[in-house]
Amino acid sequence: MFENLTDKLNATFKKLKGHGKLTESNIDAGLKEVRIALLEADVHYKVTKQFLAAIRDRAIGQEVLASLTPGQQVVKIVNEELTRLMGSTHEGPALIGRPASIMLVGLQGSGKTTTAGKLAKFLLGKNRRPYLVPADVYRPAAIDQLKTLAKKLDVGVFPSVQDMDPEDICRKAVQKAREEGCDSLLIDTAGRLHIDEALMDELKRIKAAVQPSDILLVADAMTGQDAVNMAKAFNDVLDIGGVVLTKMDGDARGGAAISIRAMTSKPIKFVGVGEKLDALEPFHPDRMASRILGMGDMLSLIEKAQSTVDEKKARELEKKLRKSQFTLEDFRDQMAQVRKMGSIEEILAMIPGMGKLKQMKQLKVDERELVRITAIIDSMTAQERQRHQIINASRRKRIAKGSGTTVQQVNQLLKSYVQVLKMMKKLNKGGFKAFGRGGLPI
């Protein structure tokens, strides 16, 4: 979502790095371009003004002007100030008490119900026992939607019905969660198309009844400055604990993510990056600043790999690779592991330097191709997956027919697989350090 901002900032930094020595005049010229880029990205004008003033104060000092690499020093300063602007450190949800209650508030359509499911999935990964509470009795199917998510996650859910009072639902849900041994309560409250007095009164009553340990505002990143204004309005009434920005995988310009902390003093705690229940990421200001500046985000990439890669399978694969016993079945399984981590473009963008490459901007990986490859391998017999050499012309026709593909596509897959095998042999001859445990050879 920050692609346009990243491109413009990098173009500005490239000009600054082109100067052997920086002066106040070319620093001011560069900051003027940064200002335009930030405003175009929908960053609040007050935030932009304060941000640029802080950069200029540091950039015209000895820290930069006396530096041997002044252009790089400016980039370092921008990175540090951008991180500070967004909150410096990650702040997780406040989980105090038993059960620890988290209220999700926000306007209708911001994604509160889906976020409740995502947070439940996140808490399950932290060895907690979440309990979902459908307190939106106004939106049709809101209660059923949360109950469906609870069933999918195999977590407890309060049996709300539409004629119940939301405040009563929440009060009873606290007791029910205790009885079922749950330690985290996630309350999905009602929303409106716009902020009104009736909505705020209801939320204040629920807050008074439950005394939540955290109140998270769920805001749509696509709304830009409206998300910032909404955060201020909800914070004035409820004193929210933080924000969850949804739809960060869309084509929003990103200004809300940069502006919210500065305008409300409240941190962004999570960002939603897709529709699936695992598409929720803790918000780390330093990592987000690196992404915005096109420096990648290796820590998030490592965490994604750790959460999706099966350690036992990784060890087994390492042994096979060392012995050059990498089969088509292993090839398929490794693709499945990579796909769990997200789209190929997302993964590559997290690698430092990759986002700046011209080839990366032109790269459009067709995810359907990965589905086709899986279908082709699944259409093979167990023997064929173990010994690709036996796949003759008639077998290729049968595999193509069974997978709904062409013989040419089957041939292309086998060719790619043979190339991987050759690469494995080279790595074995030259030492296996290049891959490390559980390396993904695709």
Image (cartoon, rainbow, N blue to C red):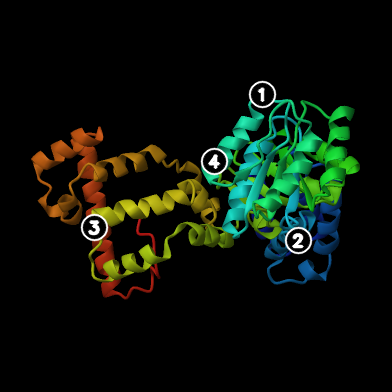
- Which comes before the other along the chain, label 4 or label 3? 4
Residues 188 and 271: in front is 188
**Which numbered disc, 4 or 3, marks the residue closer to the eye?**
4
Which residue is denoted by mark 4 in the rendering? 151
Residue at image location 85% in from the left, 34% down from the top: 202
Q: Residue 57, image x and y in percent?
A: 86, 61
- Sort mark 1 into few (<14), some (14-19) or many (20+) by Cα contacts within 10 Å: few
Residues 405 and 39: in front is 405
- Sort mark 2 into few (<14), some (14-19) or many (20+) by Cα contacts within 10 Å: some
| Residue 36 seen in the figure | no
- Which comes before the other along the chain, label 1 or label 4? 1
**Which numbered disc, 1 or 2, marks the residue closer to the eye?**
1
- Cα–Cα gap, marks 3 and 1: 50 Å
Residue type marked 1: Pro
**Which numbered disc, 3 or 2, marks the residue closer to the eye?**
3
Residue 33 in the image: above or below residue 78? above
Which residue is denoted by mark 2 in the rendering? 88
Which residue is denoted by mark 3 in the rendering? 327
| Residue 114 seen in the figure | yes
Q: Are marks 1 and 2 in contact (CB under 8 Å)?
A: no
Residues 163 and 322: in front is 163
Q: Secondary structure at mark 1?
A: loop
**Which numbered disc, 3 or 1, marks the residue closer to the eye?**
1
Q: Secondary structure at mark 2?
A: loop
Residue 334 in the image: above or below residue 112? below
